[in-house]
Image (spheres, rainbow, N blue to C red):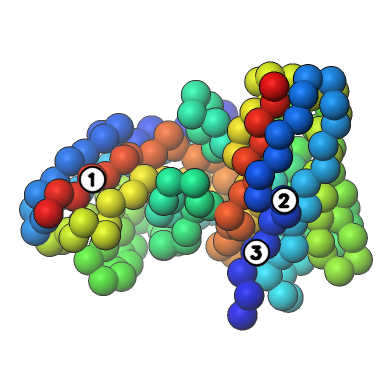
Amino acid sequence: KAGVTQTPRYLIKTRGQQVTLSCSPISGHRSVSWYQQTPGQGLQFLFEYFSETQRNKGNFPGRFSGRQFSNSRSEMNVSTLELGDSALYLCASSLDGQYNEQFFGPGTRLTVL
Amino acid sequence: EDQVTQSPEALRLQEGESSSLNCSYTVSGLRGLFWYRQDPGKGPEFLFTLYSAGEEKEKERLKATLTKKESFLHITAPKPEDSATYLCAVQDSGSARQLTFGSGTQLTVLP
């Protein structure tokens, strides 16, 4: 069974631009969560989607948004990029996100110049 | 607010030298405690889920245990390939499905 895939793997943007990251969950998994990982803050929860609906949201500004499609694939968007948005963005999928384990993708490394 | 504290921050062991990593947590109600392994530049790799105090799980040289306030990851006779950052996370029964992570323990096993 294929794991969680994320594209692109690396991205370089400049301040003020916007970016869209993509995540394809494990086949059959309907819940997708997004996390930001930085050396200073560690892994922090962004949001979670299930059946195309955002079920839970972390403490991030409105510049961070996401969506999920009917095939469970998910995208996250960051608008008006800031230097502090440089991070590894991780996507995790689970069957339904209730008591199930979350399996992570390899991440997208975003660098904002 | 959920809190997860891992110690030590870094640990260096000789090959074959057993040790334990600690994860202490504060949650209103524990739905699950998760251990992950993360190699540099990669996403976390799932290791274990523990649901209730007294539960233990094993996988190769790793054994995870859980009490009401903390979890331990015991590493028996480690090998250099066990070098990685080990992350602990909790899922609160009252906070939907998000995971709250600790800052991790960076383990280095020397040959």
- Horizontally, is B20 left or right of A83 in the view? left
Point out the residue furthest to the bottom here. A1
The CA span between labels 1 and 3 is 27 Å
Residue pointed to by mark 1 = B108
Q: Quadrant of residue B108?
A: top left
The amino acid on which the numbered mark 2 sits, given as a three-letter code, is Pro
Q: Tell me the SS state at disc 2.
A: loop
Q: Which residue is mark 3?
A: A4
Task: Please identify the quadrant where the N terminus of chain B is shown.
Answer: top right
Residue found at x 28% / y 51%: B83
Label 2 resides on the chain identified as A
- Foreground of the two, A1 or A101: A1
- Give the residue drawn at x 44%, y 37%: B102
**A21 horizontally vs B44: left or right:** right
Is the C terminus of chain B in the top left, top right, bottom left or bottom right quadrant? Answer: bottom left
Q: How many marks?
A: 3
Kind of residue sitting beneath label 3: Val
Task: Identify the secondary structure beneath mark 1.
Answer: strand
